[in-house]
Amino acid sequence: MSQQNFVVEQYTARARDYVTSVVHSTGADLDQIEAELRGHAEARVLDLGCGGGHVSYKAAPLVAEVVACDVTQSMLDVVATTAAERGLGNIVVRRAAAEKLPFEDGYFDMVLCRFTTHHWQNMDAGLREARRILKPAGRAVFIDVVAPADRTLDTHLQAVELLRDVSHVRNYSTAEWVSALSRSGFAIEGITTRTLRMDFPVWTARTRTKAAHVEAIRSLQMTAPAIVKQHFAIGEDGGFDLEAATMVVRAVG
C-alpha cells in the first residue's frame, strides 16, 4: 500500500472532525494567510492538502478561484458541502497527491499548504510540484509543525506523532524546510514561528487514536527526560506545546 493510500485509509472517517477542529479552523497563521491574499482579487489559488478546508474558506472571499486539493475523497466531499453551505461558489475540489498534481505548469498564482506536508511520501517531490504549477514569481505559504534541532527532542516528537497517527511521516526541522524549499526552486521571504498548545484528549480524539497508543504516549511523556518535559511543557494532563512555522516563499528560476 502506498503512503497516499494509507493516509486515505486513516482519514476517510475523520473528515468532519477536521472541519470542526478548533486548532485547524482558527489561528494567527490563518490571519497571516488572509493578509497575504489581500489585493489579489484575480488570483487563482491552490489549497494543497486541504483537509477540512479552512484555508479554502479563508481564501475564497479574497480571490477569483480556489482549488481545494487532497488525497482523501471524504475530505473533499465535506469541503464541497461546507463551501456550498457558506455560499463560497468559487471553491472547486480536486483529488490528487501532492507529489503528482494534475495541473499545467504555471497554472496558479499562489499555493497555500497548511499542516499536511508531514503526511507526504516525498517532501521534495511535493515541493517541486508546487513550484511547477506556480506562475513565474508566484508565491506560496507553507505551514506545518516543525521539529526541534536537538535529536532527543526530535525523537520524542516523531514518536508521539506516530503513535497518535500511524500515517505520520515526519515533522521536519526549520533547517530541513529551508534546504528543501531552496532545492525545489523557492526563495524564502519570511518565516514566522508560533507555539500551539495541544489539549491531549482533543488531540488524540481528532485522529481516533487507539487506547493502547494513547497509553503509550502518556508513558513516554511521564518517563521522558527533563529536557523533553521542559521543552514541550508537558502537563500532568498530557497537554503539551508544539512549534509551527509559517513560511512565505516565492518561485524563482
Image (cartoon, helix red, strand yellow):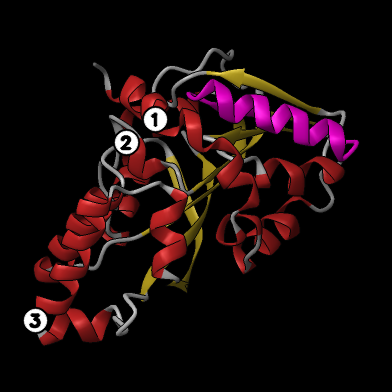
Helix, strand or loop under label 2: helix
**Label 3: few (<14), some (14–19) or many (≥20) C-alpha neighbours in 10 Å:** few
Dot 1 amino acid type: Gly
- Residue at 35% x, 20% y is 5
Q: Is residue 47 visible?
A: yes
Residue 93 image position (x, y, % from top left)? 67, 22
In terms of depth relative to the viewer, which is nearer, 62 or 40? 62
Please tell me whether residue 107 is drawn above or below residue 54 in the rendered image.
above
- Residue at 25% x, 82% y is 231
Dot 2 amino acid type: Met
Please tell me whether residue 46 is drawn above or below residue 26 in the rendered image.
above
Dot 3 amino acid type: Pro
**Label 1: few (<14), some (14–19) or many (≥20) C-alpha neighbours in 10 Å:** many
Q: Earlier in the sequence, mark 1 or mark 3?
A: 1
**Residue designated by label 3:** 225
- Residue at 32% x, 84% y is 235
Q: Are marks 1 and 2 in contact (CB under 8 Å)?
A: yes
Q: Is 80 within the magenta? A: yes
Q: 177 left or right of 44?
A: left
Magenta stretch, residue numbers: 68-87
Helix, strand or loop under label 3: loop
Please tell me whether residue 94 is drawn above or below residue 228 in the rendered image.
above
**Residue designated by label 2:** 123
Mark identifier at residue 126: 1
Furthest-right residue in this view: 87
Mark identifier at residue 163: none
Q: CA distance from mark 2 to mark 3?
A: 30 Å
